[in-house]
Image: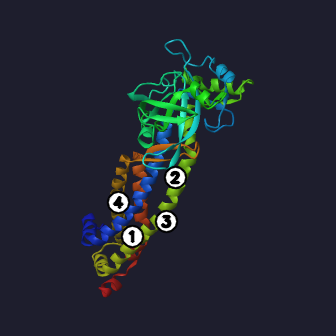
Amino acid sequence: MKIPLSYILRNLWTRRLTTALTAGGLALVVFVFATVLMLDEGLRTTLVATGEQDNVVVIRRSAETEVQSGVERRQASIIATHPAIAMGSDGAPLVSKETVVLISLHKRGSDKPSNVVIRGIAPTGLAMRPQVRLTAGRMFRPGASEVIAGASIARRFEGAGIGETLRFGQREWTVVGLFDAGNSGFDSEIWGDSEQLLQAFRRLAYSSVILRLADGERFEGLRSDLEGDQRLTVQAKRERAFYADQSKALSNFISYLGLVLSIVFSLGATIGATITMYASVANRVGEIGTLRALGFQRRSILAAFLAEAMLLALVGGAAGLAVASCMQFLSFSTTNFQSFSELAFGFKLSPAIAAKTMLFALAMGFVGGFLPAFRAARLKIVDALRAA
């Protein structure tokens, strides 16, 4: 015979204060676990969304970021002539020779400085990023000391709002427009004319060359040609893969920190669940003896107490996940360890994270409830009835 579920639910309701406290402890652990996974997912999504699948980033060989890279003008001109590059409506190749530098800006309402990416793009640069659109003002004019700022930067940094001015590269630059990059990494950048930025920072080489493939299947051939050309010392990556690589260091840090916190907190929550279930067994010895006398087998007792612990974990897990889901309305900014620049991203809850979180909660319930359930199942009928 199996013990009915209604019996298990009534026992949890009878001890509702203890049930609520234990479920609250489990919910806190689940909240931390889910939040860390959501933070990591938000970071990955932000950086992967920065790239287009048919765009290719060409940087100096052995460089890991555009800031570390340098592509000479002669090399950039050679790259721009490759036949795999798509042509624009005007017949010109879709190539953007770009300059990337870091500057320090102060956050609004604070004296705390942070590194911000300044990206110089060619006139075709905006057209090659369909996720980027102007939301206010206008595009900067080529040859002018004008810039446009990502929405995230404009909100957080002094001088980055539309109509304001920024001073860097021994010039003053007017912010003439704001753009929305669809919650990608470009939201944390300021864009201007590539040639003007080269002059302002007295640079002789571009940081990278971005190109659009006419056919995505031709990437391997293009990479082989560019990396095998003796005149060039470059490497080519798909833009999405390039930006995904930028997330590795920070993503690993978040993952390891979250793992440590989750382990520490889960130990406490599991111990709390174990104590709760042991107390439940101690208070219901006579009841257990009666169930055994009525013909319920040991495995039914074990399953009932284990199900009780799992239901407790399910309630705590659902509550923790529900609270964690509210974090999606918040944004978070930190320094990207790869580029050493400010990066804004949000928390992102996916079905996979929800499933992992609930499995984690159920695992805590199983571990915390197994030993008390096993003890309840091992009680002898005579001893249990005598203790009652």
Badge 3 element: helix
Q: Which numbered disc, 3 or 1, marks the residue closer to the eye?
A: 3
Residue 324 percent across, percent down from the top left: 37, 53
Is residue 326 visible in the rendered structure shown here?
Answer: yes
| Residue assigned mark 3 | 264
Q: Residue furthest bottom?
A: 386
- Quadrant location of residue 234? top right
Distance of mark 4 from mark 2, alpha carbons? 26 Å
Residue 80 percent across, percent down from the top left: 62, 19
Name the quarter where the N terminus is drawn. Answer: bottom left
Whichever of labels 4 and 1 marks the residue nearer the N terminus, that label is 1
Is residue 307 visible in the rendered structure shown here?
Answer: no
Along the viewing direction, whichever of 89 and 194 lies nearer the viewer: 194
Q: Where residue 314 is drawn, which disc sits there?
A: 4
Label 4 with label 1: CB-CB less than 8 Å: no
Q: Where residue 92 is drawn, which disc sits there?
A: none
| Residue assigned mark 1 | 273
Whichever of labels 3 and 2 marks the residue nearer the N terminus, that label is 2
Distance of mark 3 from mark 1, alpha carbons? 15 Å
Q: Amino acid at mark 2?
A: Ile
Whichever of labels 4 and 2 marks the residue nearer the N terminus, that label is 2
Residue depicted at x 58% and y 42%: 339
- Taking 2 as reference, is 68 left or right? right
Along the viewing direction, whichever of 13 and 174 lies nearer the viewer: 174
Label 3 with label 2: CB-CB less than 8 Å: no
Q: Amino acid at mark 3?
A: Val
Along the viewing direction, whichever of 144 and 233 lies nearer the viewer: 144
Label 4 with label 2: CB-CB less than 8 Å: no
Report crowding for label 2: few under 14, some 14 to 19, many 20 or more residues within 10 A (C-alpha).
some
Q: Which numbered disc, 3 or 2, marks the residue closer to the eye?
A: 2
Whichever of labels 1 and 2 marks the residue nearer the N terminus, that label is 2
Does residue 370 sit above or below 88 in this rendering?
below
